[in-house]
Amino acid sequence: MLFCKAEMILTRNMTARFRGGLGHIGFSQMGVVFFVVQIQILHFFIFSYSNLRDFIGGLLLRQQDFTHFGARFCFDTGPSGFARPNWLDQPALCVVEACSLRFDGGKWGALMLTLDHLAVAGETLEAAVAHVEDMLGVKMGPGGEHAHFGTHNQLMGLAGGIYLEAIAANPAVAPLRYPRWFDLDRLKGAPRLGNWICRSDDLDVELVRLDVDAGKAIRLARGDLRWRMAVPDSGVLPFDNRFPALIQWDVAVTPAEILKPSGVILTRLEVAHPEAADLEKSVGIIDPRVVFVTGASGLQATFDTPHGVRVLR
């Protein structure tokens, strides 16, 4: 197996995986990284900085803020950090925010986290549902049971392809030999907005990208739904549970697409933590609704509802 180095670029919070028979390229999250090209026997795949430069440059020439891959590309040759894509006549620094690019079997795509749903936890499901309905003034719909983690839930469809979940330990289930997800075993007191969940198109790659331990990918099912969720052995997510739980749906239609619309729109999700800057860097999500703030650990979501603006904590 042979290795070679291509040109050096500057990146911020970027990960890439180029997979398949041709080989792969991996990035670290360091400020200065090298493309490391793995060339396998009988597979001579050469990928240089100029190739990537021309590829992304072509995208930018068609659309300044290119979001087809769900990522924002910015380019700069000056000290400000963001400027014009002027690399067609000279090299430029490439800044790719919160994105993972993938070349898989001849097809380009992008891997990045997108907001999937929010979870309100309670000591009982009835308490969690009542908290949501009291705060938003909208009834939740039915849900189901999660046999593996001994929990049950109810759901509410939100605008924008996301949904809201009320979840609690199922008292009808015998004690488990392992911790429940969402740190539910330690939950005490009033119901609260406890977790946010982000979707990935390739959970395995995402878990490699992260600089924190977001857990192991566990296969789960409920009815016709199939998905994988990254769950730490302790049930506790990084940054005091402020790091999002990561999910990969293995179905053509996700819950957000089939839930009855509620008329509720998420406008802002505040993710508060004393180390908010580090948390934001680790997550690497691009979503104008998600805001990281420095302060006591907690989540706060603001919604437009049929009854006006409502806040859920």
Image (cartoon, rainbow, N blue to C red):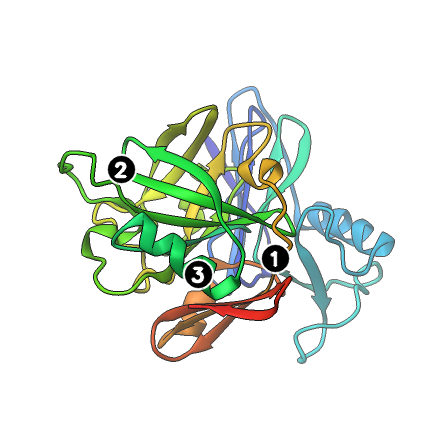
Q: Residue at x 38, y 80 (%)?
A: 295
Q: Is residue 121 visible?
A: no
- Disc 2: CA contacts within 10 A as few (<14), some (14-19) or many (>=20): many
Q: Residue 195: name its quadrant.
A: bottom left
Image position, residue 103 (x, y; %): 62, 35
Image quarter where the C terminus lies is bottom left
Q: CA distance from mark 2 to mark 3?
A: 26 Å
- Secondary structure under the numbered disc 2 in the rendered image: loop
Residue for badge 1: 264
Residue for badge 2: 149
Q: Residue 120: name its quadrant.
A: bottom left
Residue in front for this viewpoint, 178 or 137: 137
- For discs 2 and 3, the disc positioned in front in the rendered view: 2
Placement of 106 over or under 53, stated as above or below: above
Which is nearer the N-term, disc 2 or disc 3? Answer: 2
Q: Amino acid at mark 3?
A: Ser
